[in-house]
Amino acid sequence: MSFKTVYHTTLVLFLPLTMTYIFFIRLFVPHQSLFMIPDFGESDVLHLNIPMKKILSDALKDKRWPLWSSDIASGFPLFAEGQIGTFFLPNLLLYRFFPFVLSYNAGLLTAYITAIAGSYLLYKCLGYTRFIASFCATVFTYSGFFAVHLSHYNLVQTATMLPLIMWAGISLYRRPTYLKTVVFAFLLSQQIFAGYLPIVFVTLTSVSVWWVIRLIIDRYRVIDQVGKCVLLCLATLLAVGFSAVQLVPTFELWQRSFRLGGLDFASATAYPYPPRHLITFLFPYFFGSPSDGSYPPFNDSWGIFWENTAYIGILPLVLAILGALFALRHRIVLPFFGLLIISLLLVTGKYSPFYLLYSLPPFSLFRVPSRFLLITLLSLTVLMGFGLTKIVNTLEARFKKGFFISVTLVSFATLFFIADGFAFSYNYPPVSGVDQWLDPPKIVALLPQGSTVASIGAPQKWNDVFLSKGWKDIAPYYFFKNNLFPNSTVLFGLKNFNFNTGGLHPKRLGYFTSMGRHVEFNDQLNVATLSAQTVNVLSLSATAFITSPYILNEANVVEVNSVHDEAGRLDPIRLYRLNFTRPRAYLANTTQLVTTLEEASSEFSDPEFLSRGSVLVERDDLIITSSQTKIVPVTITHEEPTSLSININAPEKSLLAVADNNYPGWVATVDGKPATIETVNLTQRGIRIEKGEHQVFFEFRPVSFLIGKWITVLTGIIVFTAIVLKKFIQPCTV
């Protein structure tokens, strides 16, 4: 390798590697830290992504798949929900072999490196010089889009795959081969595994629109156009085959969720992007900043800062506008100009002339149209690179000093970007020590290990701080840890009545947990009144404790302790105990038939429901009556995330009720013989038990996971075989 090659390579790598070092070193030295960004009512870092990745880390280190979590909402199909990102290769390797916090931060670092590498390949594929491609890759990666989404871990991991998939898609379009088809399918399947399907849809939209525009420009014969479209469909279908191990369980959950059939128009266009928000491409804080509480709260006509911001800097934007003017006569870059226009129309959602799309699948399957800003960002950086290329070529033709001019202009643009766009991204996320967030809060010491807790009223108090002061002072959020939000209890050895996924969840579970949140708040008196329905549902779910910054007005709930803010600025967080809570597993000798959700809701609303000691069933043959109602606790002898063993001594014919959620894939045996699991109390598991001693064993063996696994394996075998045959079996020539 010549000195000149080494020199040029060093120059090309210097900018992105230096920016990456500067941006991420603060997470690793002088001590481990986190990008801990508060959101509305919670933090997706602390209350969603860290707990999910902790479950993943523990499972992989224990050499099992995280198919189910019994610590969230009385049991949740976490793998099927998808955002845990189990089979995304960086997650598989990092969380299997490295400490948890290091893996979490390294996952973000890896995502940014993926964005740099993928976008560099894309810009080189479009014909840009190495220096310009390196600069464009840096602008794409360290633009505002990713910085404001750093609290959305799986979104960042998924979104940073877009340039790589676009590169593979363009390469496949230009010269279709078996290998390029497989590469495209593999990369798309990895994006699916990363866990954020709305961004996968954005990516497929981007690739598809690019292909359509390019086909129109190239004016192929109809048969050739159809052939290329079929090729893209086959490559996408192959990606579905590769990722079936994830998609089949997710499809099963989707069928049982509120999203079956799509969202209504209002939900699909929620968190809107008003056209006047385009001014933030010039001035990102024009309307205020969430960091100091000056940005307006979202409503029906206004969106969220971190969903509506994709700032790239002033100079890159000017270069992009210049590039757009030249792109109109350049068939290689013109598709990205078309993507820019279409993405901006999609971003504006209900304000767009395309607004009717959001009432139709697949657009109606996802929320937040402003996530199409990812396409806008990619298109702007492509056009920016084209504009910079035009300037460099013009000056080179005039002054005959190409290398010097190229390096000088890129260096100038880089310095301008560092002082503007990169500075915005660097300064946006607050950084704080890991221990401040992952150490148990004081209230945990007041609770028995393994207890099930519910949190009431915590988001209101969180927002009192967030909407007025932002996160310039991060200390109040340390104290708010004592509220034990869902899913953060996973970090402290506790179970939680509720869940936080932001994605798919079973419809019945949604109904059940919403009944546990029927609470009236009086902020003037700082009092919260629990409904009878809430008390009954919490009791049925074996919830023994409640945390709340409010004074709870309920006779069946007793305050047992409280934790106070040392600075004296915030209301104390109180710990309450329910006077009566049903055991997690018990025998009931009385059942009551309900056939509709309304009937179940009515029963749960009855203040006398618990005293009757009955279990709600949904079939006539499960009705059991007794002259003397009894609830008999049973002994759980062994528990793992996907199994449960129970010993029973039934004094009479009874129904075994377990407070854990019933979901397809759970199977049971009684004394070693298969038994039917019934759904009781709307969401829970039940089994008919005859008089006497018995051993009951529950195990989670989802058929959807097995089917998906075999589809993935068979797809891999078929692809491998096809590549081998292609390589070694050549056509016979005479």
Image (tube, helix red, strand yellow):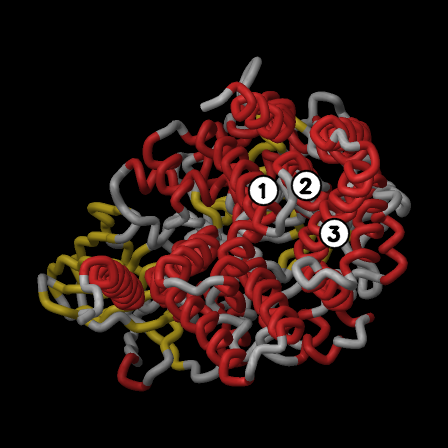
Position of residue 299 in the picture relative to residue 80 (left or right): right
Using residue 127 as the reference point, say whether residue 304 is left or right of it: right
Residue identified by numbered label 3: 383
If you read the primary sequence from the N terminus, does the residue marked by circle 2 or circle 1 appear first? 1
**Sequence-earlier tag: 2 or 3:** 2
Cα–Cα gap, marks 2 and 3: 10 Å
Cβ atoms under marks 2 and 1 closer than 8 Å: yes
Which dot marks residue 459? none
Q: Which residue is mark 2?
A: 136
Q: Is residue 615 left or right of residue 151?
A: left
What residue is at 30 percent from the left and 49 percent from the top? 65
Q: Which residue is mark 1?
A: 120
Residue 652, image quadrant: bottom left
Classify mark 3: helix, strand or loop: helix
- Residue 369 in view of the camera: no
Name the quarter where the N terminus is drawn: top left
Question: How busy is the neighbourhood of tag 2: few (under 14 within 10 Å), some, or many (20 plus)?
Answer: many
Residue drawn 19% across the image and 63% down it: 729
Crowding around mark 1 (Cα neighbors within 10 Å: few <14, some 14 to 19, many 20+) is many
From this viewpoint, is residue 301 visible? yes
